[in-house]
């Protein structure tokens, strides 16, 4: 059996650590190299086949260490998602410059056959004239946006494509490149095992204790929503399984981009409220903008409502998952991924909070 060595950036993050665990259970994986600027978690330290490198991808030095293992596949999940208050330049260095270093590594290492990059849906840009009925396709491309996360991701995808095209122009060998643009990733691991700051965790009251999180929990005692509020979700198991498919199967492309979202109805505000047992409070976009600006500056970014992010709670971005469906079928719909606690990590859900999907 041919075995692969997998290099995963963001190995301490929600998705990265999950991939480390699931890849490590496969007989066709020889070794996993995990890189992250954060220390290795106790959970990760117990995972088989994982070699952990505690290093910021934006700082040189990790390349030589990783190259020694001759990775076959590079999976780039690392990202500083929460905006760093007053440190936009450093955040750019970590995210954009750091990603450039990962891409350069993948394009210069002879052992690398595949590169998988986690992008975002946000860079389609949440705008006032967006409509529920319009499903953004991969061919439409990204649009300019002042929300730092969306802007950085757009620029990074542009850098990836430019680097790929330049390497091909020079006649050098290039790995297969797959870009995935995820809907909001959810599941029992994200909601109960690796509790992250996010809308769903806040509405469900699952945030860790602390003054700021108590404020957020209080503010989300109802579901504040504009007329344009909508979310798409993809289950963490589907994310894992499609990445495994892209990693191990012979996929028929050189460079490809996928919206990774189920072909299903998205989650609207009433669906969200019903799922978390709360009522919707209608608000206007200007109210969201004002509240976001106040909490961003009042807490110096501890509440992550950075400039431009208010629009993503006010105007819709709905992606088409039709292209993904031609190569992978999601096991969970958007609403099922959000509403229920089924999945590989369901044992982490406290018994009194388990909500399996009815079988009939």
Image (spheres, rainbow, N blue to C red):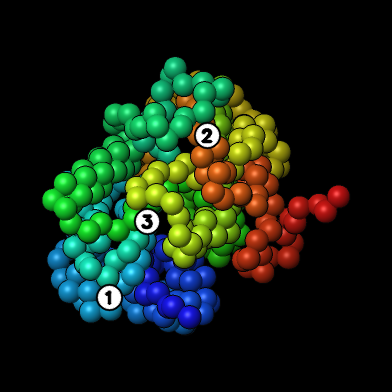
Label 1 vs 3, first from the N-terminus:
1
Q: Residue 7's image quarter?
A: bottom left
Residue at which label 1 appears: 70
- Residue 4: x and y, percent? 40, 74
Say left or right for 300 vs 93.
right
The answer to whether residue 331 is above or below residue 12 is above
Question: Are discs 1 and 3 less than 8 Å apart at CB?
Answer: no
- Residue 33: x and y, percent? 34, 74
Q: Residue at x 17, y 74 (%)?
A: 64
Residue depth check, mark 2 versus mark 1: number of the one nearer the observer: 1
The answer to whether residue 30 is above or below residue 307 is below
Residue at which label 3 appears: 116
- Asked if one can make out residue 36 in the rendered structure from this viewpoint, the answer is no
- Marks 2 and 1 sit apart, C-alpha to C-alpha, by 36 Å
Say left or right for 221 vs 292.
right
- Asked if one can make out residue 277 in the rendered structure from this viewpoint, the answer is yes
Label 3 vs 2, first from the N-terminus:
3
Residue at which label 2 appears: 320
Label 2 vs 1, first from the N-terminus:
1
Crowd tier of the residue under label 3, counting other residues whose Cα lies within 10 Å: few below 14, some 14–19, many 20 or above? many
Q: Secondary structure at mark 3?
A: strand
The residue lying furthest to the right in this view is 360
- Residue 149: x and y, percent? 33, 42
Q: Residue at x 23, y 68 (%)?
A: 110
Say left or right for 278 vs 76.
right
């Amino acid at each position: 059996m041919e075995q692969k060595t997998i290099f995963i950036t963001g190995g301490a993050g929600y998705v990265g650590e999950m991939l480390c665990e699931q890849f490590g259970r496969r007989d066709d994986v020889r070794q996993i190299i995990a890189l992250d600027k954060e220390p290795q978690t106790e959970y990760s330290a117990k995972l088989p086949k994982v070699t952990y490198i505690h290093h910021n991808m934006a700082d040189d030095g990790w390349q030589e260490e990783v190259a020694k293992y001759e990775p076959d596949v590079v999976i780039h999940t690392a990202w500083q998602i929460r905006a760093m208050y007053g440190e936009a330049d450093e955040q750019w260095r970590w995210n954009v410059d750091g990603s450039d270093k990962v891409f350069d590594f993948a394009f210069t290492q002879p052992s690398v056959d595949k590169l998988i990059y986690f992008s975002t849906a946000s860079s389609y840009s949440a705008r006032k004239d967006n409509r529920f009925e319009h499903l953004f396709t991969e061919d439409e491309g990204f649009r300019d946006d002042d929300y730092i996360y969306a802007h950085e991701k757009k620029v990074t995808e542009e850098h990836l494509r430019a680097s790929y095209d330049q390497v091909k122009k020079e006649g050098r060998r290039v790995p297969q490149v797959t870009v995935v643009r995820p809907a909001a990733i959810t599941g029992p691991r994200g909601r109960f095992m690796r509790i992250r700051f996010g809308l769903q965790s806040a509405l469900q009251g699952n945030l860790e204790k602390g003054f700021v999180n108590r404020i957020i929990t209080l503010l989300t005692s109802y579901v504040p929503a504009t007329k344009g509020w909508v979310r798409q979700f993809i289950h963490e198991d589907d994310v894992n399984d499609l990445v495994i498919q892209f990693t191990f199967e012979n996929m028929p492309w050189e460079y490809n981009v996928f919206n990774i979202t189920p072909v299903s109805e998205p989650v609207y505000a009433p669906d969200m409220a019903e799922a978390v047992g709360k009522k919707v409070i209608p608000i206007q976009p200007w109210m969201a903008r004002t509240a976001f600006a106040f909490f961003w500056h009042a807490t110096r970014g501890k509440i992550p409502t950075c400039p431009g992010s208010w629009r993503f709670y006010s105007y819709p971005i709905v992606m088409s998952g039709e292209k993904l469906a031609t190569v992978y079928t999601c096991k969970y719909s958007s609403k099922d991924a959000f509403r229920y606690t089924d999945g590989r990590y369901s044992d982490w859900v406290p018994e009194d909070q388990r909500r399996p999907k009815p079988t009939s």
